[in-house]
């Protein structure tokens, strides 16, 4: 499948040639993200990037929690909900 990126003055979009924008289910888009919940913010990193940075082995990564989400925004909302309900 070829990735095509289109731009114009009104929008920027990317799509896979031959696939519809709604192709796949929500479950198909689930990824692992790592979140760090603080009282003032929720930080999010994509799972592969977190591992690449050494988050699984280094001291700074010990307080990051893995979550399954369909986008980085979804992962952040999971963290916010956990923070607000004290499920850390």
Image (spheres, rainbow, N blue to C red):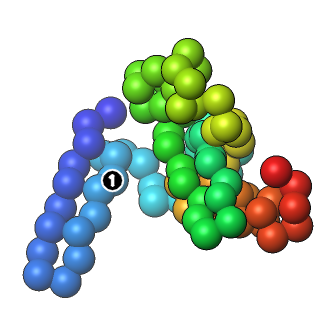
Q: Residues within 10 Å of mark 1 (few under 14, many from 20)?
A: few
Who's the residue at 45% across and 56% down the image?
20
Q: Position of residue 75 (x, y in %)?
A: 63, 54
Asked whether residue 70 appears in the rendered view, the answer is no
Residue 44 visible in the snapshot? yes
Q: Position of residue 61 (x, y in %)?
A: 57, 31
The residue to which callout 1 is attached is: 15
**Left or right, 75 with reference to 3:** right
Quarter of the rendering containing residue 62: top right
Q: Is residue 4 above or below residue 57?
A: below
| Image quadrant containing the N terminus | top left
Name the residue located 65 percent from the left edge and 58 percent from the top edge: 38
Question: In the rendered image, which quarter is residue 80 located in?
Answer: bottom right
Can you say whether 60 is above or below 25 in the image?
Answer: above
Between residue 16 and residue 43, name the one nearer to us. 43
Q: For this view, does 55 lie left or right of residue 4? A: right
């Amino acid at each position: 499948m070829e990735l095509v990126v289109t731009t114009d003055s009104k929008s920027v979009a990317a799509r896979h040639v031959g696939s519809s924008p709604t192709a796949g289910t929500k479950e198909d888009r689930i990824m692992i993200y790592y979140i760090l919940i603080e009282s003032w913010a929720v930080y999010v990193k994509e799972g592969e990037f977190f591992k690449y940075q050494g988050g699984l082995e280094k001291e700074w990564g010990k307080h990051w929690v893995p979550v399954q989400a369909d986008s980085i925004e979804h992962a952040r909302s999971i963290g916010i909900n956990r923070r607000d309900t004290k499920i850390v």
